[in-house]
């Protein structure tokens, strides 16, 4: 399976910026050894969809509500994302967990809603600096996996997990290759424990200050199935440079 290189644009750019960025990514997407995904802000999804349709670049949302519709001011449903051309959605990002108080249970409900709507979820997990300093990183991530994903062998999960150490997101601090290897091996074990043989095929992305300079090293770590990229995805040339470092499936 090829690695997935996903760009989370977060809350950046106006429509013209989003269109220009999408065009830059599409222009360099042909022949790359990986899958490409861009996740712009909600308001830019229709404009970016027009640019990426028919290209190797997939489109995703940055969150969705667990309900199909209803009195949820400011929220977006998974069906709405699907309706404007998205096929992926990022769920449980640390910025959602911290800034909006999202719980593992809420993330799991969103995962189920996304899958029902035909979206592929990218479920984010990761520990804070204090939790790592206290030696709790595997405990924290283990609980997040158990609480955020559908439960048990009888439940299929066709999504992706993204390990993003909170202390390395947008901080310029780098997890070492050994840090990443240790946590990805642990996550693989947890996925196999939770989903049996199916857990072996779930891709695990790494995210946290991934840049062109460190992409090749990080993407070569065992059990790294791609990258979820923040700041470096806002420049097409940087995003594509990371994609060129990906390992073919």
Image (spheres, rainbow, N blue to C red):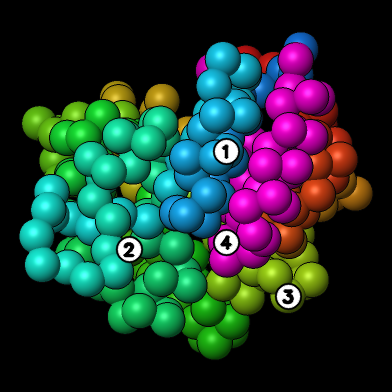
CA gap between label 2 and label 4 equals 22 Å
Q: Position of residue 169 (x, y in %)?
A: 64, 68
Does the residue at mark 2 contact the one at mark 1 (Cβ under 8 Å)?
no
Question: Which residue position is annotated with label 4?
Answer: 10
**Region in magenta:** 1-30
Does the residue at mark 1 contact the one at mark 4 (Cβ under 8 Å)?
no
Image quadrant holding the N terminus, namely top right
Q: Secondary structure at mark 4?
A: loop
CA gap between label 1 and label 4 equals 14 Å
Residue 229 is left or right of residue 85, and the answer is right
Mark positioned earlier in the residue sequence (2 or 3): 2
Q: Position of residue 38 (x, y in %)?
A: 58, 40
CA gap between label 2 and label 3 equals 22 Å
Look at discs 2 and 1 and give the one toward the viewer. 1
Disc 4 crowd rating (10 Å Cα; few below 14, some 14-19, many 20+) is some
Image quadrant holding the C terminus, namely top right
Q: Secondary structure at mark 2?
A: helix
Q: Secondary structure at mark 3?
A: loop
At horizontal 13% and vertical 48% (from top left) the residue drawn is: 68
Q: How many numbered tags mark residues here?
A: 4
Question: Which residue position is annotated with label 2?
Answer: 144
Question: Which residue position is annotated with label 1?
Answer: 48
Which of the pair 121/223 is nearer the observer? 121
Residue 96 is left or right of residue 3, and the answer is left
CA gap between label 3 and label 4 equals 15 Å
Look at discs 1 and 3 and give the one toward the viewer. 1
Look at discs 2 and 4 and give the one toward the viewer. 4
Which of the pair 162/68 is nearer the observer? 68
Mark positioned earlier in the residue sequence (3 or 4): 4
At horizontal 79% and vertical 24% (from top left) the residue drawn is: 27
Mark positioned earlier in the residue sequence (1 or 4): 4
Residue 164: image quadrant is bottom right
């Amino acid at each position: 399976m090829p690695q997935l290189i996903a760009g989370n644009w977060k809350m950046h750019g106006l429509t013209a910026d989003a269109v220009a960025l999408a065009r830059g990514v599409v222009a360099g997407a042909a022949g790359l050894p990986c899958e490409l995904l861009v996740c712009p802000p909600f308001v830019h999804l229709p404009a970016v969809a027009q640019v990426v349709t028919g290209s190797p670049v997939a489109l995703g949302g940055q969150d969705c509500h667990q309900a199909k519709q209803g009195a949820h001011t400011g929220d977006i449903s998974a069906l709405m994302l699907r309706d404007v051309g998205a096929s992926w959605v990022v769920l449980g990002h640390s910025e959602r967990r911290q800034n909006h108080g999202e719980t593992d249970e809420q993330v799991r409900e969103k995962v189920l809603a996304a899958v029902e709507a035909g979206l592929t979820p990218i479920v984010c997990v990761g520990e804070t600096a204090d939790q790592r300093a206290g030696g709790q990183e595997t405990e924290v991530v283990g609980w997040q996996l158990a609480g955020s994903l559908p439960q048990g062998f009888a439940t299929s999960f066709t999504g992706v997990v993204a390990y993003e150490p909170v202390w390395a997101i947008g901080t310029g601090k780098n997890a070492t290759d050994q840090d990443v290897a240790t946590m990805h091996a642990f996550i693989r074990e947890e996925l196999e424990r939770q989903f049996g043989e199916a857990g072996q095929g779930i891709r695990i992305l790494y995210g946290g200050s991934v840049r062109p300079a460190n992409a090749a090293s990080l993407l070569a770590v065992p059990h790294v199935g791609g990258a979820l990229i923040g700041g470096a995805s806002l420049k097409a040339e940087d995003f594509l440079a990371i994609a060129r470092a990906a390992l073919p499936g």
